[in-house]
Each structure stands twice: as C-alpha cells, then as structure tokens.
Amino acid sequence: MGELSHSLFGTARNSDISSVKQLIMKLKRRQDVDILAWQIAEGHLASFGKVVNHRLDTINCMVRREHSWVQSVLHDIMSLSSAQTRAGTILAMALNRLEQFTIMHSDLSQFQHGLQLLTTGILSPAFNWCLQLIYITL
C-alpha cells in the first residue's frame, strides 16, 4: 500500500519517513551539542565579565585615589605659594622699614652733629634743614 499510495497520491514511503526521522534526530543531537557548548561559553563569559568588572572597579578606585592625591598635592602647593607670597610681602615691608630707619638714623646723626657744632658756636649746613623746618612750622 505504501508504494501504491506513493505512486497515486505522492505520499511518503516508510524509507522516506525513516530518512527524515534520522535527519531530525541528527539535527536534534547537533542542537543539544550546540546548546551545551553555548552553556559552557555563557559560563566562561559570565566569569570573564566578573573578572573584567572587578578589574575595572580596581582601576576606578586607583584613579580616585590618584585624583585625591593630586588634589592634596595641589592644595599643598597652593598653600606653600600663598605662604611664600606672604613671606615675600613681609620681607618687603621689613626692608622698607629698615630703609626708613636707616634714613631717619642718618638724619638724626646729622642733627646731633649739628647740635654739637651749635653748642660750640658754629652753625653747620647739616643743621640748616632743621632750622628751615622750624621756620616753616612757625
């Protein structure tokens, strides 16, 4: 009946069904092997992803620590720069005061010398500026 039905109606023979069944079984086995391979690969990829994430987290922590360290160094440099600026300003003010003191000391020495000469009856040109100052104020 299989051959007659095949000849008349084009139905499949038992051998045709058997070869299709073997092909389907072969495809199923291959699919099972591929699924297993994918499961193994998925496990390896998940493990690889965890390792990569851990390494990226470690690198991120290192970058944050380095950033913090650079910020700290920058702050220290700015503090030192500010301290050096203040020290320079104080030194400039001290030198200015020293110059004023030196000028005043010189003027007082001239005034003292002029007073000593005046006590002996000699009017010194070094003493003239003091007399001019007194004259202006009177």
Image: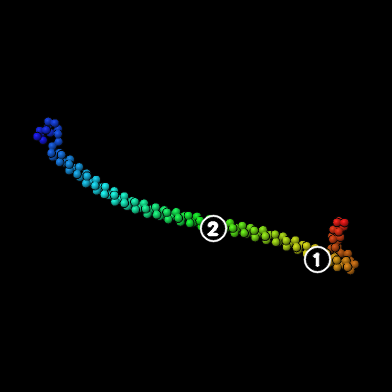
For disc 1, the neighbor class at 10 Å (few under 14, some 14 to 19, many from 20) is: few
x%, y% of residue 34? Answer: 26, 47
Q: Which of pointers 2 and 1 indicates the residue nearer the eye?
A: 2
Does dot 1 land on a helix, a strand or a loop? Answer: helix
Please provide percent x and percent y for residue 54: 39, 54
Q: Residue furthest top?
A: 8
| Circle 2 residues within 10 Å: few <14, some 14–19, many ≥20 | few
Q: Is residue 79 above or below residue 117?
A: above
Q: For the C terminus, which image quadrant?
A: bottom right
Amino acid of disc 1: Ser
> Which kind of residue does numbered mark 2 sit on?
Val
Task: Mark yes or no: residue 76 visible.
Answer: yes
- Which residue does the numbered mark 2 point to in the structure image? 73
Measuring 77% from the left and 62% from the top, which residue is drawn there? 103
Tell me if residue 117 comes above or below residue 68 in the rendering.
Answer: below
Q: Quadrant of the N terminus?
A: top left
Circle 2: element type: helix
Q: Earlier in the sequence, mark 2 or mark 1?
A: 2
Q: Is residue 132 visible?
A: no
Colour scheme: rainbow
Residue 70: image location, x then y, percent: 52, 56
Specify whether 116 is left or right of 20: right
Q: Which mark is residue 109?
A: 1
Q: Quick check: 94 left or right of 78?
A: right
At x 42%, y 54%, the residue is 57
